[in-house]
Amino acid sequence: MGFKKLKTLILKNTPRKLVNIYQEPIKKENEKLDPFSTLSYSQEGEDLILKRIFEGQKTGFYVDVGAHHPKRFSNTYLFYKIGWRGINIDAMPGSMAIFKEIRPNDINLEIGVSKEQEEKIYYMFNQQAINTFSEIEAKKKLNIEKFKVVETRKINTLPLRMILKQYLPKHTKIDFITIDVEGLDFEVIQSNDWENYRPKIVLVEDLNNFHLTKLNHNRVFKELNKNGYELVAKTYNTLFFKNIRQD
């Protein structure tokens, strides 16, 4: 057995609390080595843009659709650490077990999200971050040599408006919502009730990598613009929209 496999086996069979006890000093030491570095958990630094937008706001509420993992590629974990709370949603069977362990103060939901309440085929890959309900996106990923579908499963899905109606705490305003569902992001946007659930900021993954000069051809941009949001920032794959409606 190689060292890498042995390390994986040891970590898998060691209680997480014990692992954290030994890892925390290492993390603190790494931070001391480079005092000019800035910590980000997002894939493209989205949490740092959000941190700037909500600078000085010590508490707030987020909704993470397609949450994937409590830390890895997370746009919300940086905020959880400073005292924010929210709702994490992911369709992957068994995905919420680790959320409940690492982020017990959040509302963690194992639910698929789509435009209407229905049963959809969920494509699960050897890289869980790219799991999707989109057959088109699944076929695209299969053209990349390192990715393969390990399982497909029929899963019941709900519109975002129904999920928020049931699980959003009463009188709670959403500060930001982040949507990353590998190809069905537009469908999730369509499934929300933008009159009753209006976050200040909306993040949406857009895999089309449109040019900034061609916004009028982008359906995510047009749908959110129609609902009173304007584009205020962008990373390579993520669009940031701000609520500009004065209600």
Image (cartoon, rainbow, N blue to C red):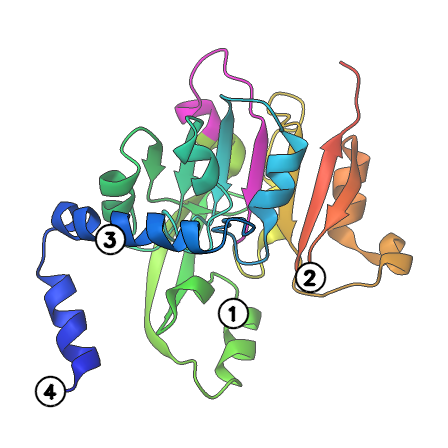
> Could you give the CA–CA distance between mark 3 and mark 2, rounded to whole angstroms?
31 Å
* Residue of label 4: 1
Q: Where does the magenta region start and end?
A: 164-180
Q: Label 2: few (<14), some or many (≥20) within 10 Å?
A: few
Give the side of residue 27 with respect to residue 180, left or right: left
Q: Position of residue 207 (x, y in %)?
A: 65, 64
* Residue of label 2: 236
Q: Amino acid at mark 1?
A: Glu
Name which residue lies at 60% across and 44% down: 48
* Residue of label 1: 135
> Could you give the CA–CA distance between mark 2 and mark 1, rounded to whole angstroms?
23 Å
Quarter containing the C terminus? top right
Q: Is residue 198 above or below residue 135?
A: above
Q: Amino acid at mark 3?
A: Gln
Task: Give the residue furthest to the right.
Answer: 213
Q: Position of residue 56 (x, y in %)?
A: 59, 23
Task: Give the residue furthest to the top.
Answer: 171
Q: Is label 2 in contact with label 4 (beta carbons under 8 Å)?
A: no
SS assignment at label 1: helix
Name which residue lies at 53% across and 31% down: 161
Q: Amino acid at mark 2?
A: Tyr
Q: Label 1: few (<14), some or many (≥20) within 10 Å?
A: some
Q: Earlier along the polypeptide chain: callout 2 or callout 1?
A: 1
Give the side of residue 186 with respect to residue 42, left or right: right
Whether residue 199 appears in this view of the structure is yes
Name which residue lies at 53% across and 85% down: 143
Residue 23's disc number: 3
Q: Amino acid at mark 4?
A: Met
